[in-house]
Image (spheres, rainbow, N blue to C red):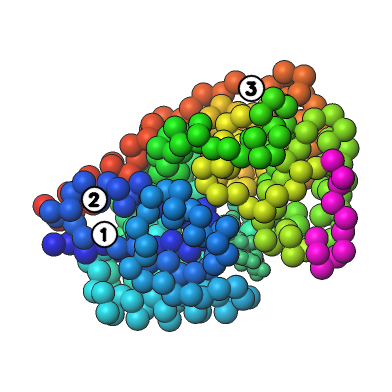
Amino acid sequence: MIRVISVVGARPNFMKVAPIHRAFQAVSDQFEHHIVHTGQHYDASMSDAFFADLAMPQPSYFLGVGSGSHAQQTAKVITGFEQVCLEARPDYVIVVGDVNSTVACALTSVKLGIRTAHVEAGLRSGDRSMPEEINRLATDAIVNDLFVTEHSGVEHLLSEGAPSSSVHLVGNTMVDSLFWALPLADNSTVLDRLNLRTVPYALVTLHRPSNVDDPEQLRALLTTLATLSEEVAIVFPMHPRTQKHVADLGLSLPAKVIVTEPCGYVDFLALMKNAVCVITDSGGIQEETTALRIPCVTARTTTERPITTEIGTNVLVPPEPEAITVAVRKVLQGNHKHGQVPELWDGHAAERIVSIISRFYE
Ligand code: UD1
């Protein structure tokens, strides 16, 4: 029996690992699959709700690292995950995405000589002031197997010197989860609870340090939402990081904007699927809106997911009031891209990953 550990740490990891777990369950005569949760995200709304919505089993190990500086958080994951690896003796470790838990666990397992894969390898924003960009570069430089969501990722990895035999374009496991959960989203009551069933609305998420840690920038973004809320209903499930800065700065929220706690996965899909437009600085939401063909305005200067702007519904705009307002108004006027869904974003990426891994052990 081959023992595989997949690591989850923060909110965007759960939907990437859920389909991988299901694909391993289908070959349980050959593989034993365990989930390790580092506890980087720990609030019920940022973690527990996702296990329930995605029908994931409880993690076999929970490290409980919690928040801290980047160094503290990364160090705690490394020491905790080393103990897990020594105890559980996995043959194979899978890390996903670009959060601190991703790089910390990759570093740990590679140094223990365990074959390690990165799912969502090769994405590059080119902006090294983003903590996620450092996590992506460092992880891809050391792991054995690189599973990639879009062509740009393959190009980056090859130009950085990865052997082509280690690079596999497989599609997007986040989109696997999206297609799996869409029927559940149709039963969500979130639109009724927010009185949005018959009202056109824009859905907003903002949590990037570059947008919410700087007081002036956060103020400017809230003012932009206030302006837009005169033209369209706005619902804003607020990330804990953003909530904390709003509270610390004593900022008041625009009266007409519907601010909620972070949503569960299925409720968020329901909100996304029925929105006229999404305004975000997230990575994954750029992909989810492209897969759903919902117009997305990304308030960032760079994206590590260029396929979403090249063929998808995403537009990148400088995170400034004027640029965001103009882009959203265009969408409201019906002047937006209809987009195509990228190659291999078909709901079967996790099966491809598991089938490639099983070939390593033939
Ligand atoms: C992390 C990821 C980011 C991802 C995001 C999605 C890194 C470097 N960043 O950013 O790539 O897009 O998750 O959510 O790994 N907090 C809570 N409860 C929680 C989690 C966080 O209150 O369950 C608060 C804490 O005050 C914490 C702050 O949010 O200090 C930031 O959390 P952290 O995990 O460090 O980074 P995120 O901003 O969530």
In the figure, is residue 95 to the left or right of 11? left
Q: Are marks 2 and 1 in contact (CB under 8 Å)?
A: yes
Residue bearing the label numbered 3: 337
Q: Whole-Å distance between the Cαs marked 1 and 3?
A: 40 Å
The picture places residue 265, in percent across and down from the top left corner, at 52, 46
Q: Is residue 349 visible?
A: yes
Q: Is residue 274 magenta?
A: no
Residue at image location 75% in from the left, 48% down from the top = 259
Tell me the kind of residue under disc 3.
Lys
Which comes before the other along the chain, label 1 or label 3?
1
Foreground mark, 2 or 3, reads 2
Examine the residues drawn in magenta and state their main secondary structure. loop
Q: Locate residue 91: give its quadrant.
A: bottom left
Q: Quadrant of ligand 1?
A: bottom right
Looking at the picture, tell me which residue is in the foreground, 249 or 90: 249
Where the N terminus falls, by quadrant? bottom left
